[in-house]
Amino acid sequence: MFKKILLATTGSPASFGAARVAFDMAKRYGSEVTIFHVVGVPTKAFSHVVNDVRTGEEIEIDEDYLSWVEEELKTTFAKQFEGTDNAKIVLTTGVPAREILREARKADSDLIVMAASSGENASFHKGYPGSTLQKVAKAARCPVLSVHRESASYWGGFSNILFGTDFSKQAESAFKFALSTARELDCDLTIFHALDISGKVLDQNEIEERLIAARKRIRDTYVPLMGDFKNYDIEVWEGIPYVEIVKLAREKGVDLVCLAHHTNELDPERARIGSTVEQVILRANCPVVSVSKPDKV
């Protein structure tokens, strides 16, 4: 399921949560894990002088510097390396999102793991993830798992997966990933739809009718695809979608939230990560995986 994991990291505290999850997954599922770090962006084409990804300072890249960075990463993740036999560090220079995608294709990664913010001083701006995550999540051929907080719960593997759907075309790939993961890892799967009533005036009878219709749509759309898989339940609530997803995840002790990368734009090359996914990444107390394309699900 997770044979090859690519951990894209700056090595800063912002990435510690993502590193913990990636290494724990590698140990539990016997995965190869590549710790991938983009040292900096060249100031000129083919230049050995780069702007450091974390500090922005100009640095001349040579073998001594690369060796120092590698040792720093080994020291930073020393505890995670303990007991991990199949881990390696890969360093490169370039534009971070482009290099992460290039390495994922080259290594045929099954999963990219990264922090929702990407640097020592990085933060969400008006609730939106940084541009590196945006670009990677949009173009990746495999699912992208993001961890916003180091405290995000992940205790010894996945046992309870929450798949949130708005019944869009893009949600089909996210469902396939959620189902295949739940099936292979013997997890419980919750299929969830939040009836969006934000900014709308609906009487309670209409809300109840829409909730019943949504539950029926889940049964008609997804249940026939599950075959003999029985470890699932269906939940339909009304409210603001990201709020209800986060609430349900906390209530059920969910280990992984699975969502489509985008919904409004059919062309994944043009679509940005959806606002619901952004807010769930920001607020969830567990890892969140976004699925953009069906290649690796």
Image (cartoon, rainbow, N blue to C red):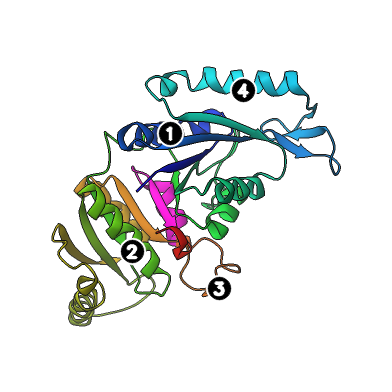
Q: Is residue 286 magenta?
A: yes
Which circle marks residue 176 in the picture? 2
Q: Residues within 10 Å of mark 3 (few under 14, many from 20)?
A: few
Depth-wise, is mark 3 or mark 1 nearer the camera? Answer: 3
Kind of residue sitting beneath label 3: Asp
Query: Toward the viewer: 190 or 102?
Result: 102
Q: Is residue 174 magenta?
A: no
Kind of residue sitting beneath label 1: Gly
Give the residue at x 53% y 55%.
137
Asked if one can make out residue 244 in the rendered structure from this viewpoint, the answer is no
Where residue 293 sits: x, y (%)? 48, 64
Q: Which residue is mark 3?
A: 267
Where residue 151 sits: x, y (%)? 37, 33
Looking at the image, is mark 3 or mark 2 earlier in the sequence?
2
Q: Is residue 142 left or right of residue 66?
A: left
Asked if one can make out residue 245 in the rendered structure from this viewpoint, the answer is yes
Q: Vertically, is 200 above or below 194?
A: below
Q: Is residue 128 left or right of residue 163?
A: right
Q: Which residue is mark 4?
A: 70
Give the residue at x 14% y 64%.
228
Looking at the image, is mark 1 or mark 2 earlier in the sequence?
1
Looking at the image, is mark 4 or mark 3 earlier in the sequence?
4
